[in-house]
Image (cartoon, rainbow, N blue to C red):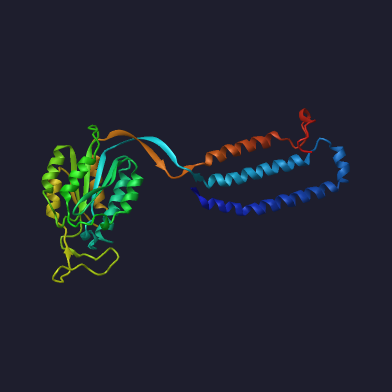
Amino acid sequence: MFRFGNPEYLWLFAAVPFLLAVYIYLNIRKRKDVQKMGRLSTLKMMMPELSLKRSYLKFWLIFGTLCAGVFLIARPQFGTKVETVEKEGIELVIAIDVSNSMLARDVSPDRLARAKQILSRLIDVRRNDKVALIVFAGEAYVQMPLTSDTQSAKIFLNTINPDLVPIQGTAIGEAITLGVSSFSSDKEISKAMVIITDGEDHEGNAAGVAAEAAKAGVMINVLGIGSPDGSPVPVNEYSNNFMTDNEGNVVVSRLNEQMSMEIAESGEGLYVRADNSSTAVRALEAQLDELETGKSTALSYSEYDEKFPLLGWFMLAILLLEILIYDKKNRLFRNVRLFK
């Protein structure tokens, strides 16, 4: 694929017709001024060393350099760039609840969308960490294995929706177990999990599993999302109709804050409630910053590779060539008829 990093600079090509018009006008004026001194054929005989073709060539070289300069500052990019980078961070597994209750709109725009916004910012801040993504509802699945490619993590994060896990529930214990198994065996790097959930329909002994994870060196942090007062659960993320139970009552989902606190305490981590502010992210950042980091190397991929250095070298070569071409014939190369 090909693109320009700063395509707005391509508008400079709008000045090209003006430059050509000025050049043609100046050449006409110059010819008329010379003709005042006599016939052109006679004047050429009087100045045998002068070469008009050389001056034309020098102009076109300068003109080509200016055009290449416009492309250069527009930053042409194509191909894929792969490089080995060394990072110093921690290993972080993010587990996100995708049960239907996460569609409740007691936070804006809804719990799941807000959770993805918070986690996207957290991934940006923790760009030196290795990150893995787990989705869970009634079951837990690895959405993305542990990787240092945080941009890929954000792409996967944007694809998360309740359809990924058809079985309803909140299997936090299973998510923690799966998260612990997702870490590497490197004992020099600190490990932490961030679980974001409303905690409703909680299944299993999540607090006990979190305690076992803490013993294994994994800090369990819980980000509660929603409100204890609750909110109706939409049929889907685009609908204004709400789910009902068997008796026709509207289903209301409430944040199970007590359970979330217990899991975080057992996992020797932090519990914080997410809202429409950035308080939760800042609290998590501070908590994760206390962990000891370790060095790791990884391949970094970028979809577009910068190619402007090639144009820079091309411009330099053309400018050197323009300098080496005299307006008059060089006596050392008198017999070379390149411009005849």
- Can residue 202 be seen here? The reply is yes
Between 36 and 195, the residue placed more toward the observer is 195
**Residue 59 located left or right of residue 11:** right
| Residue 262 x %, y % | 12, 49
Q: Which picture quadrant has residue 245?
A: bottom left
Quarter of the image that includes the C terminus? top right
Q: Observer-nearest residue: 97 or 284?
A: 97
Horizontally, is 72 left or right of 89 in the view? right
Residue visible at 84% across and 36% down in the picture: 48
Percent x, y of residue 303: 43, 45
Give me the residue at 51% from left, 41% from top.
307
Frontmost residue, 329 versus 99: 99
* Position in image of residue 100 (x %, y %): 22, 60
x 47%, y 42%: residue? 305
Image coordinates for residue 256, horizontal then vertical, percent: 14, 56
Query: Residue 277, can we see it?
Result: no
Q: Quadrant of residue 82?
A: top left
